[in-house]
Amino acid sequence: MIRGRTAEKGLRDYVKGIIMEEKVQFTLNGKQTSVTVDSDRMLLWVLRTTLGLTGTKYGCGQSLCGACTVLVNNEAVRSCMTPVKEVKGKTVLTIEGLEANGALHPLQKAFMDSDALQCGYCTPGMIMSAYAFLVGHPRASTADIVSGMDDNLCRCGAHTRILQAIQHAAQEMSGGQ
Ligand code: FES
Ligand code: FES
């Protein structure tokens, strides 16, 4: 037992010795945030486990599905492949930061109204990708939206309703024009 504990402590010290923890500061959902972590750790895990923001999902871990999408300096990035050191001094927006003053963002509302989900696992990544896309393409056509969202996968096959929701939100975001 004692020997086991000694071995465990030895292993912990060894791991500590090879992992370089450092302070990483960034703005998260509008608030200054500071974490002291292995700066090579992926942003997804810092958000989910260090900061407790579990809205951002782990799907493939290989930049293939989009479930982990967040915005960094207003651009959609795959947090599963983004070391946290890369967001130093930048702004990060997650699904938790999208509502304003207690009101859902038009995209969140449109996903609910269009019932654009089944299990909901892809939904935060879909919404964050759509948000980044619509901010950059306020007058996107249906074809533009389909191609802009091409890299986000929904395993439940809710794509038709997802597209509908994004179209409705696009109209609302552009003031109904
Ligand atoms: S979990 Fe990051 S792209 Fe799939
Ligand atoms: S709603 Fe289940 S993966 Fe998209």
Image (tube, rainbow, N blue to C red):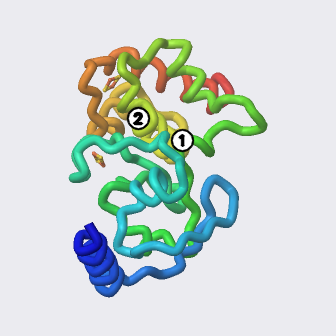
Check the image and report above or below for 51 versus 8.
above
Evaluate whether residue 137 shows in this view. no
- Asked if disc 2 is less than 8 Å from ligand 2, the answer is yes
Q: Residues within 10 Å of mark 1 (few under 14, many from 20)?
A: many
| Image quarter (top left, top right, bottom left or bottom right) of the C terminus | top right
Check the image and report above or below for 15 versus 96.
below
Residue 9: x percent and y percent?
Answer: 32, 76
Taking the image in four quarters, ligand 2 sits in the one at top left
Residue named by callout 2: 126
Nearer the camera: disc 1 or disc 2? 1
Residue at 52% x, 34% y is 139
Residue at 28% x, 41% y is 59
Evaluate whether residue 88 shows in this view. yes
**CB under 8 Å between callouts 1 and 2?**
no
Residue 40: x percent and y percent?
Answer: 35, 73
- Asked if disc 1 is less than 8 Å from ligand 1, the answer is no
Q: Residue furthest front?
A: 1
What is the spatial separation of the Cα atoms under label 1 and label 2, in whole angstroms?
Answer: 10 Å
The amino acid pointed to by label 1 is Ile
- 8 relative to 49 in the view: left or right: left
Indicate the secondary structure of the residue bearing disc 2.
Answer: helix
Residue named by callout 1: 95
Q: Which mark is residue 120?
A: none
| Image quarter (top left, top right, bottom left or bottom right) of the N terminus | bottom left
Residue at 43% x, 80% y is 21
- 2 relative to 141 in the view: left or right: left
Indicate the secondary structure of the residue bearing disc 1.
Answer: helix
The amino acid pointed to by label 2 is Met
53 or 99, which is in the foreground? 53
Quadrant of the image occupied by residue 90: bottom right
